[in-house]
Amino acid sequence: MIANNAFAIDLGTSNIKIYNAANDKVLVQKNMIAIENRKDMIAFGDSAYEMYEKAPANIHVSGPISSGVIADIRNMEKLLRSFITMEFRGSIKAADYYIAIPTDVTEVEKRAFYDLVKDSNVKAKRIMAVEKALADGLGMGIDVKNSQGVLVVDVGYDTTEISILSLGGIVLSKLIKVGGHVFDNSIVNAVRREFNLVIGSKTAEGVRISFNDLSQNEGKATVYGRDIVTGLPVERTLTHEFVASTLQENFRSIVDNVRVILERTPPELSADIYRHGLFLTGGACQEEGLAEKLSNEVRLRVNIAESPVNSVVLGLSQVIKKSPYRALAYTIEGLGR
Ligand SMILES: Nc1ncnc2c1ncn2[C@@H]1O[C@H](COP(=O)(O)OP(=O)(O)OP(=O)(O)O)[C@@H](O)[C@H]1O
Ligand SMILES: [Mg+2]
């Protein structure tokens, strides 16, 4: 028997992750597109990101996902078709698609994920949805079908999704607008306030991530930007303390929302959550100090994902590979109509 072609896709705001069952590999690329003169795609993925914040006015670089949902359907279709064409080395063949979908969004927004695959001309045979938080749990090695009371916190680019899973379903889920990009913006604003200096969000991200390994930069980083007063390019030194204190407010809103979810959790599940600890994932969960703060404030052991960027797509790959998990996937054809 010839196995079906199948793809699992996590459409992140920052990174698109595509698992290809044919070679059992995961592709991670920036979920970005570069359009020239309002019509021609000149780059996609990582190479579009290279142009971000650097391109001239006639080249528009953007990401079609915003706060976890599809904001620009046409460009997302172009991107998906481009990535799938790449996976098939030029000529697209019929395949099944498994898509991760956030829970705390409208039915119309959920249905848009189905329409996206259907309308992208990728020869989709079956289009299946899996709740993103369940995929996250599976991807972190949790047997989500048989576990009760699992708290998953996914800190992404634009959003943090906080969910309580139990026996293959979602008991509670909340999507809040905090993530790595919000961290970057906080740094951009603080630098402008403190030093009259305008820096780009890519620069802010670079500094933030460089401080995760203090042995590398001894707690100091040099940034280049534009002085607000003189308009001239200048360099300044940012300290680790400055950046860390800037991020406290963002950490606080994640902690507070985890608290709210815990307060709403049925007491029967609280004991299980206490036993398992909190499962932390998403690229920005690696931000220094966040796991520690969460653990101190909500008094739970924190388990950090082995590969935080990929846990959703790895979970989706389990749904494709392991038949007991197939039941976690559902069809969304009729939704939102
Ligand atoms: N080592 C690291 N330390 C801190 N932050 C990191 C690190 N590596 C990646 N990130 C951050 O992770 C974020 C991207 O993570 P991820 O791929 O999980 O987001 P996404 O799935 O695209 O977004 P969303 O889930 O919000 O739609 C970026 O903001 C990036 O700065
Ligand atoms: Mg994500």
Image (cartoon, grey):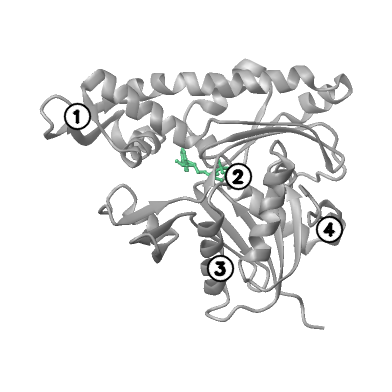
Question: Does residue 250 lie above or below 115 as drawn?
Answer: above
Which mark is nearer the camera, 1 or 3? Answer: 3
Secondary structure under badge 2? strand
Say which residue label 3 marks: 81
User: How far apart are the alpha carbons under marks 1 and 2?
Assistant: 37 Å
Q: Amino acid at mark 2?
A: Val
Question: Does residue 264 lie above or below 75 as drawn?
Answer: above
User: Residue 243 appears in which quarter of the rendering?
Assistant: top left
Q: Do the residues bearing badges 3 and 2 touch, measured as CB atoms within 8 Å? A: no
Q: Quadrant of the N terminus?
A: bottom right
Residue occupying image coordinates x 81% and y 44%: 144
**Earlier-in-chain disc, 1 versus 3:** 3
Q: Do the residues bearing badges 3 and 4 touch, measured as CB atoms within 8 Å? A: no
Say which residue label 2 marks: 69
**Earlier-in-chain disc, 4 versus 1:** 1
**As drawn, is 308 to the left or to the right of 226?**
right
Secondary structure under badge 1? strand
Q: Amino acid at mark 1?
A: Arg
Badge 4: residue crowd in 10 Å (few <14, some 14–19, many ≥20):
some
**Earlier-in-chain disc, 2 versus 4:** 2
Q: Is residue 193 visible?
A: yes
Query: Which x, y percent locates residue 240?
Result: 34, 25
Query: Which x, y percent locates residue 41?
Result: 41, 65
Say which residue label 4 marks: 326
Which mark is nearer the camera, 1 or 2? Answer: 2
Say which residue label 1 marks: 236
Q: Amino acid at mark 3?
A: Arg
